Amino acid sequence: MTTHHNPRPNLRRIARQLGVSAMTVYRVINHAPSVREETRKRVLEALNWHGYFVNKRKGIDAIVFDVISGNAYFEKLASTMIDNLERNNPGTRCFRTDHRLRPEEYFNRVAQSDLAVFCSLPESELVEQTRATNPEIYTISLSTENSSDVVITADNIRGGELAAQHLHKLGHSHVAVFLDEMHPNRYIRYKSFFSEFHLLNPHCRIDIIERRGLELPGAVCRAYFARSAPPPSAIFFLVGFHAQRFYRDVVLPEPERFRDLSILSYDRNEDLFTDHPEEVREFDRIEFHPQDMIDWALYYICNRPLMQKASRIRINTHARLQTAGSVKNRID
């Protein structure tokens, strides 16, 4: 669920509710040392509840960016944010790490930083280890759900619903869904697709094609189609990379066999294939713009919320359906 905030809360009303003066509230906002710690905590909690953000922080932040090395998508996210911060905030110090390859370097940077930005699909365990290393650190995570203070992802629930509505609208009632156990958002996308499709058509059939470990996606799909009778009229890939590989490795060698099969994908080609996106096939797809996540991340980096006793913040960016003719109309 997208978190909404009131950007201009009534500070005098908050002061009255707390039984303090409006001047005390303003002193807390401006980090004045004269406010008693107990009062400061009460005011911070109330400000958080009303969605108030401090627009000017004390000092200069050191930010550690944890990035999956060799992953063009996540490296682009991190590079775009770092370039923006270094250009617009000359005093900001940004450090790139990879906790998978260099854990000691990562935790050393964490100990010296004010913020940790994850472009690395971290598990909640890593986030908690990060907090244990530096209890004062503030954490932001892009693309996957975890226990970070701020999590920014695509609206995967809405994406799954849009996929189900698209296939149902074009008359499909038997669909295969490809799941890759390495993809952290697969179940969020799948569960929303499954629920919406069954709501639209209680008699539909949904098959799961699940890839585990290092299994070859093409081999997994061929094994499924060899035993599926009757075959599905459509296949939905929760990651666009696998849709492209399926078409290349399975469909092209047997075009007549798969002539009537519809393919629905997820993600934008330009995000998955950053070097030559124009060379990959266009499918009907659910997509989101990574720039939306970048913009939100930069906002929360530059406008750190008052996090004491605050609920963690979850932002879902807009998901949309794009059509390219790969899902065929089965309605007469």
Image: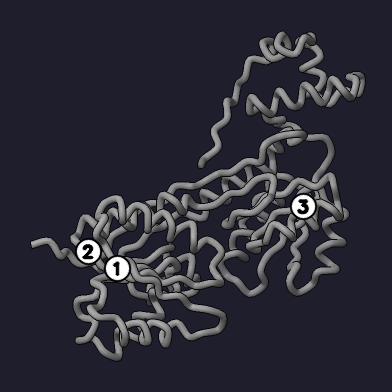
| Kind of residue sitting beneath label 2 | His
Pointer 2 local density, CA inside 10 Å: few below 14, some 14–19, many at least 20: many
Does residue 87 sit above or below 58 in this rendering? below
Report whether 104 appears left or right of 127.
Answer: right
Pinpoint residue 104: horizontal percent, then vertical percent: 85, 68
Instruction: Depth check: give the residue in front, 296 or 237.
Output: 237
Pinpoint residue 230: horizontal percent, then vertical percent: 22, 78
Question: What residue appears at the point 60 percent right and 71 percent down from the top-left corner?
Answer: 71
Q: Which residue is mark 3?
A: 63
Indicate which label's residue lies in the foreground, 3 or 1.
1
Pointer 3 local density, CA inside 10 Å: few below 14, some 14–19, many at least 20: many
- Residue that protrudes farthest toward the bottom in the picture: 253
Q: Are marks 1 and 2 in contact (CB under 8 Å)?
A: yes
Q: How far, Cα to Cα, is label 3 from label 2?
A: 48 Å
Does residue 150 sit above or below 102 in this rendering? above
Query: For residue 19, which quarter of the picture?
Result: top right
Indicate which label's residue lies in the foreground, 3 or 2.
2
Pointer 1 local density, CA inside 10 Å: few below 14, some 14–19, many at least 20: many
The image's colouring method is one colour
Instruction: Depth check: give the residue in front, 13 or 26.
Output: 13
Query: For residue 330, which quarter of the picture?
Result: bottom left
| Kind of residue sitting beneath label 1 | Val
Does residue 90 sit above or below 5 in this rendering? below
Q: Earlier in the sequence, mark 3 or mark 1?
A: 3
Q: How far, Cα to Cα, is label 3 from label 1?
A: 44 Å
Q: Which residue is mark 2?
A: 172
Question: What residue appears at the point 19 percent right and 86 percent down from the top-left corner?
Answer: 256
Q: Earlier in the sequence, mark 3 or mark 2?
A: 3
Q: Are marks 3 and 1 in contact (CB under 8 Å)?
A: no
Q: Which residue is mark 1?
A: 175
Q: How far, Cα to Cα, is label 1 from label 2?
A: 7 Å
